[in-house]
Image (cartoon, rainbow, N blue to C red):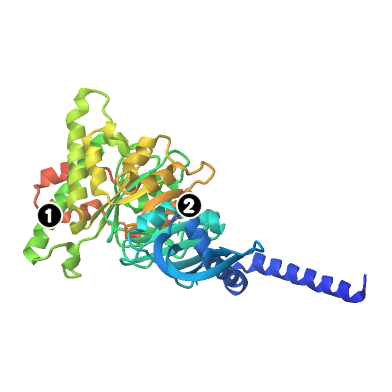
Amino acid sequence: MSDTTLLMLGVLAAAAAGLWAWRRWHYPSFWLAIAFPLTAISVRATWRKVALGCNLTKKRQRFWFTTVPGLVSSTGVVRVRRKFQRIAVDTKPFMWLPKPTRYGWRVTLHTLEGQIPGDYSDAAERLAHSWGVHAVRVSSPRPGRVVLSATVRDPLVRVETLPSSADLLKVIVGRLETGGPWMIDFKTVPHWLNAGATQSGKSNLANALVQGLAPQPVALVGFDLKGGVEFTPYSPRLSALGTTRTECVALLDGLVGLMTSRMAVCREAGARNIWQLPDDQRPVPVVVLVDELAELYLMADKSEKDEIAKTSTALLRIAQLGRAFGIYLFCCGQRIGSDLGPGVTALRAQCSGRICHRVNDPETATMTLGDLDPAALASARAIAAETPGVAIVASQDGQWYRARSFYVSEQAAEHAATTYADQAPAWADVISGHASQMSDADLAEFLDSIPDPRKA
């Protein structure tokens, strides 16, 4: 082997090793400089075949030169002549140039006549396999346009802690499959329903929420019918905590009374909600964290029927009217089914924020996501047990996404609750407007029915 050949092989080996190291240690720059240009060329070059294979083309009439057989000469040679005539051809949707994203690329298409975005959503899995990417999501910014967002690799394999949000009632709890932050914004989506089996990441999401809300000027109220084992470690930051059904009923009565008093304040000030009030008159927002929602509706015997009905009515009233008056719900449960009664179904209708982790029964997934998108339901049922924290989220933009919350240990959430204990307003101060309408005896009895979690 000549020296030139050896030199060329050495250069190629060094280049391959350098590219591998570049891709391994700084993938974003490698993706933008090397991988994406090659991917964009491949996508544009194969688009016609891919569209034809995914049934995204349309037959159109075009004038074209065709070859038709002529006379056969005595030598056996067929004389061919060209003819200009209309023929049916397969026309692909027009594709703009792909644009890079952090985890893949996106491209805008012009839909053909008779096509809707649903046609491309139905073909999303076939498109992903054709281009060899992790997933393809479809969105439509305006009529006649469809945006394909391809994810080359799954961004949820490893989720790093993201910076906290500085905005009130906004908490970044994880990452979406698009690579963007997964944010729970109570001002935009006031009430949330969070379903998930044991070890699915449901409690971890609650930890992330407590850690994010702890430094904010909000009141946290807990409903923990596991005897308080879930939320008691966060008691320094809680303004009130109900650990039995009796305490939860009294707490719900207080929240309904608080909502009524805030209605009167807004009516007198001519405001539609508390956010239109002056800063010095605006009451503190209240975030209600409910763990094991089903326990509020389970009935052991008929003697509990009236108490459950009262609980269901109060919780539904808060979900229907609480947003305007600064009361927000985050309800968690392992199982949420219609067999718990009509109160759960009515509450589900008021919770526009939906989060579904891995569940043990399909009815819970259907109850959480079934009325939004059948594709979201199928994706929720496919969550593996080896991926805790992965969930299907109905986002505030009207679409659903796969997402994963970053890991927040119980110790980290407890440390945040202890650090920001001074941010927790006393329950008597929270309901001060409602308490002014009560007698001293009724107020004392009402406050005694709800133990102060910080003195437990």
Please report contact status of discs 2 and 1: CB closer than 8 Å, yes or no.
no
Residue sitting at x 11%, y 47%:
440
Which amino acid lies under the numbered mark 1 shown in the image of this protein?
A: Ser
Residue 414 is labelled as: none
Q: Give the labeled residue for mark 2.
A: 125
Residue 364's x, y, as percent? 36, 38
Residue 261 is labelled as: 1
Residue 425's x, y, as percent? 27, 57
Q: Which of 278 and 295 is in front in this view?
A: 295
Q: Quadrant of the C terminus?
A: top left
Let me know if residue 85 appears in the view: yes
Q: Seen in the image, is 54 located left or right of residue 244?
A: right
Q: Quadrant of the N terminus?
A: bottom right
Q: Seen in the image, is 301 located left or right of residue 56?
A: left
Residue sitting at x 21%, y 42%:
346
Residue sitting at x 18%, y 57%:
325
Mark 1 Cα shell of 10 Å, populated few (<14), some (14-19), many (≥20) = many
